[in-house]
Image: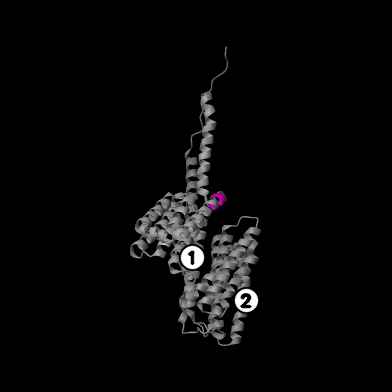
Amino acid sequence: MNNTMEAPFIGPPEPTDSGNEINSLFSQAINAMKEGASIAGILRVGGAGLMVFSLSLFLMDGMDATSDLQRYFLLLAQTVLLTTAGFAVGMLLKEPRGARVFFSLALVSIPANFAVLGAMIYSIVPLDDLLRQYPSYATWKSASISDLLIASAAGLAVLLPMSVFCFAVLARNSKWWLSGAYLLSSASLLIPVRDTFSITIISSICAVGVLLLISNRKKLGNRLATSEEKFAKTLLLIPAALVLARSAMLYDIDFHFALSIVIALYYLMRRIVIARSGSTALTVTIQILTSICALVLACMIASLLESYVPAFALFLVVNVIWLALNVEIRRFIDSPKVYSFIHGMWAMLFVVGIGIDVVFIGTVTGYSIDTTISVVIVVASIVLRQKSGVVLGLLALAALLSANGLQLISIVVNAGWMGMAAAGATTIVAGSLLERFWPVIKLRLVTRFGRFSKDSTDYEDIDSSEELDAEPVRIAA
């Protein structure tokens, strides 16, 4: 007789009303925290914008003050107030994000203080003759050398500790070199020169020096930088940008000044391309705009060579420079389709230019340059594995031969046996050099620029290895 009793199956306990209520309250609390954080972020951004706008209004109109020296002291006081506000928000409200916003604004205001002090120095000891009647918001004058010394001492006493303290909040481990580099680059605003060529040199030295310093510190560091530290490093470029902005607003712009602006814009867009990955619409747009900016830069660089290069060869120079810049940014473009579009845009532009030259100009020198550009398009497209560029280059070559075939034949005939012999010998030597060095050149090009092709080859190898591994399993089954 079996005396055991079978107990009925009891599943997991059903949720009670009190449990559902707790979960509901917890979810509502999480959602409320998320909404509060997003609203707080919007408020912080809006407040920062208002603070920057108020600083701009102060620089334009100032406050009730009897002299520019007092206006400068008020500007210093505003920097101190921003730092104090950040300290109060962090210590009293225990809200670090809002505190960092105030500290960042205080750092942004430091170059403005240097710019005003530089205007006061320029009013006393200008090193050029570009003094003029400035707008009211840009008119800052020092009454005497003593006032200038007082303003400089006050600025040093206030801005030096403010800079160290604010950088210590954003990037504690890098506060000393960041504050030193920031103050040193801001000091470029004190140099009493205003001609655009000197300004271009000064801003370029500041920007290059900052970038080299950041790169060197990155190599020496053995840890990942936080987002606040990256932002602090970006602030180091503000003085160089402010030097350019001041000249653009108050003085005439020449070619060298415009070139420096285009170089800075291209570098900024290139950094954005490096930082952004993926193939979203915004990322693709930035990548294409970077290539267009590279075209503008190539045209400006080619115009610098106008005195040294024949005019008909500048088209080839633009072609090569734009190609080099496109190939350089290709390493940071994830989508092969996007780069194919950029490469096709490059090839199409020059093929259209070749067509215009053939139809409306048609000179012998232009024909030789057009042929060279077509060959460059074909060779570059073969190396980069861009079929559209190969097709466009071959179409351009066919159009050139059909339009100037008789002229080419006459050139060959008129060259005589010596010219033909020289051309044959040159062709043989070129073939020998190509056979000797092409494998090495191709290997280096593929290693440096052939990431997409390598990735696709890796994928094919993986797929084939998976099929080989899977075959015995199917046989065993």
**237 shown above or below 474:** below
Which residue is found at the position 57% from the left and 18% from the top? 4
Per the image, the residue denoted by label 2 is: 156
Q: Position of residue 287 (x, y in %)?
A: 46, 57
Residue under circle 1?
Answer: 265
Res. 330 visible in picture: yes
Outermost residue to the top: 1
Q: In this picture, which residue range is highlighted in magenta?
A: 433-437
- Left or right, 79 with respect to 279, comes to right
Q: Amino acid at mark 1?
A: Leu
**Crowding near the residue tagged with mark 1, few <14, some 14–19, many ≥20 C-alpha atoms within 10 Å:** some
Q: Is 377 located above or below residue 208 in the figure?
A: above
Classified by dominant secondary structure, the portion drawn in magenta counts as helix
Residue 334 visible (yes or no): no
Which of the two discs, 2 and 1, labels the residue nearer the N terminus? 2
Name the secondary structure under disc 2.
Answer: helix
Q: Amino acid at mark 2?
A: Leu
**Where residue 195 sits in the image (x, y, percent)?**
51, 79
Q: Position of residue 284 (x, y in %)?
A: 44, 54
Query: Would you place residue 15 above or below residue 65 in this image?
Result: above
Q: Residue at x 63, y 72 (%)?
A: 160
Q: Quadrant of the N terminus?
A: top right
Judging from the image, the colouring scheme is one colour
Quarter occupied by residue 366: bottom left
